[in-house]
């Protein structure tokens, strides 16, 4: 059932405008009469009319010529010289260079219900001048509005962590979506970049506190591991000292040497408990 409905929707799509047929052969008898009068007027007013009929298109431009409202066969003209007839022909220049525009900051609600402000930049150019003139009123304005809605739609399916870490993937997804949507307008989206992601101030403080707590927890774990390793080393040292009684005396003398090297005015001499027990008995 769904396949039949989708097939019906595809069949009901409107046909392409007749202007895209690039044919001026069906302008009718009246149209040919007007064209003939225009040619005759040009011949009568020579050589003055030559300056009105010859136009120049720059290297980065293309000209779409309309004759009695129809696009001439052959599509866009240029670069260089081209010829038009007075009164019946008109033309529109289309810039083929890459155009850059900033996407205004968009307030987006992410998948995990966090509000962020995201902006970006889009690079596009006109790939087909005929489609850019005949299929849409203002290709530049339409591309700008479509970029804003696409940014909101793409970021709405991502959570905050993905937005902060997967900017390249988001930009590539936006570029593919924009390129497919603007293909019928003769627009080629070359590149999309995410410029900045602004978080609310309270969320920034919460994330900073979380990061600080995480660092403190790692520091405590490292300190605990150090204490455990130190205790194991002390245990091994005590076993070695227990095997040799003279080692304890050497360690005692080394400790005194260390204390004396620091220029201390007080030196503590530890006394064995056996000596103190004799005084306690008396």
Image: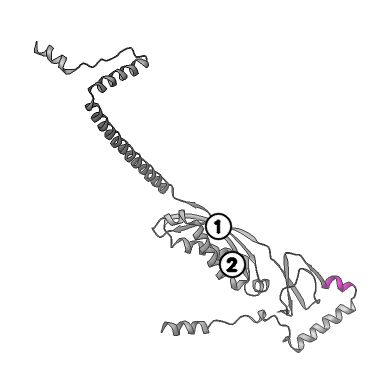
Residue 75: image location, x then y, percent: 71, 76
**In the displayed image of the protein, which residue is found farthest to the bottom?**
29
- The tally of labels here is 2
Query: Left or right of 111: which side holds 274?
Result: left
Residue 153: image location, x then y, percent: 47, 64
Relative to 48, residue 198 above or below: above
**In the displayed image of the protein, which residue is found farthest to the top?**
282
Residue 23: image location, x then y, percent: 71, 82
Query: Left or right of 190: which side holds 109?
Result: left
Relative to 142, residue 88 above or below: below
Image quarter hosting the C terminus:
top left
The magenta span reads: 45-53
The secondary structure that dominates the magenta segment is: helix
- Determine whether the residue tagged by mark 1 lies in a helix, strand or loop: strand
Query: Left or right of 76: which side holds 148?
Result: left
Q: Residue at x 63, y 80 (%)?
A: 17
Image quarter hosting the N terminus:
bottom left
- Determine whether the residue tagged by mark 2 lies in a helix, strand or loop: helix
Find out whether residue 47 is within the magenta segment. yes
Q: Nearer the viewer, mark 2 or mark 1?
A: 1
**Depth check: 102 or 40 in front?**
102
**Depth check: 200 or 165 in front?**
165
Neighbourhood count class around disc 1 (C-alpha, 10 Å): few under 14, some 14–19, many 20 upward: some
Identify the residue position indicated by label 1 in the image.
193
**Depth check: 154 or 17 in front?**
154
Q: Which mark is residue 142?
A: 2
Neighbourhood count class around disc 2 (C-alpha, 10 Å): few under 14, some 14–19, many 20 upward: few
Q: Compute the Cα span from label 2 to label 1.
A: 19 Å
Q: Residue at x 68, y 63 (%)?
A: 97
- Of the two numbered discs 2 and 1 on the same chain, state the one appearing first in sequence: 2
Q: Quadrant of residue 116?
A: bottom left
């Amino acid at each position: 059932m769904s396949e039949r409905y989708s097939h019906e929707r595809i069949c009901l799509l409107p046909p392409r405008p007749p202007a895209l047929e690039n044919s001026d052969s069906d302008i009718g008898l009246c149209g040919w009469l007007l064209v003939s009068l225009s040619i005759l007027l040009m011949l009568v007013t020579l050589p003055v009319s030559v300056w009105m009929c010859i136009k120049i298109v720059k290297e980065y431009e293309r000209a779409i010529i309309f004759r009695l409202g129809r696009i001439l066969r052959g599509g866009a003209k240029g670069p260089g010289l081209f010829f038009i007839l007075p009164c019946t022909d008109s033309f529109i220049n289309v810039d083929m260079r890459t155009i850059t525009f900033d996407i205004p900051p968009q307030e987006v609600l992410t998948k995990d219900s966090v509000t962020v402000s995201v902006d970006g930049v889009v690079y596009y150019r006109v790939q087909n001048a005929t489609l850019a003139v005949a299929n849409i009123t203002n290709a530049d304005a339409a591309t700008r509005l479509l970029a804003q809605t696409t940014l909101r739609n793409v970021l709405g399916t991502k959570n905050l962590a993905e937005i902060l870490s997967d900017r390249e993937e988001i930009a590539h997804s936006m570029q593919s979506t924009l390129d497919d949507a603007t293909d019928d307008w003769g627009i080629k989206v070359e590149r999309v970049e995410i410029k900045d992601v602004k978080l609310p101030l309270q969320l920034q403080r919460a994330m900073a506190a979380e990061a600080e707590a995480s660092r403190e927890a790692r520091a405590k774990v490292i300190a605990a591991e150090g204490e455990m390793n130190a205790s194991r080393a002390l245990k091994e040292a005590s076993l070695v000292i227990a095997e040799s009684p003279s080692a304890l005396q050497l360690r005692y003398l080394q400790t005194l040497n260390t204390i004396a090297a620091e220029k201390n005015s007080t030196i503590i001499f530890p006394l064995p408990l056996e000596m103190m027990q004799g005084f306690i008995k008396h």
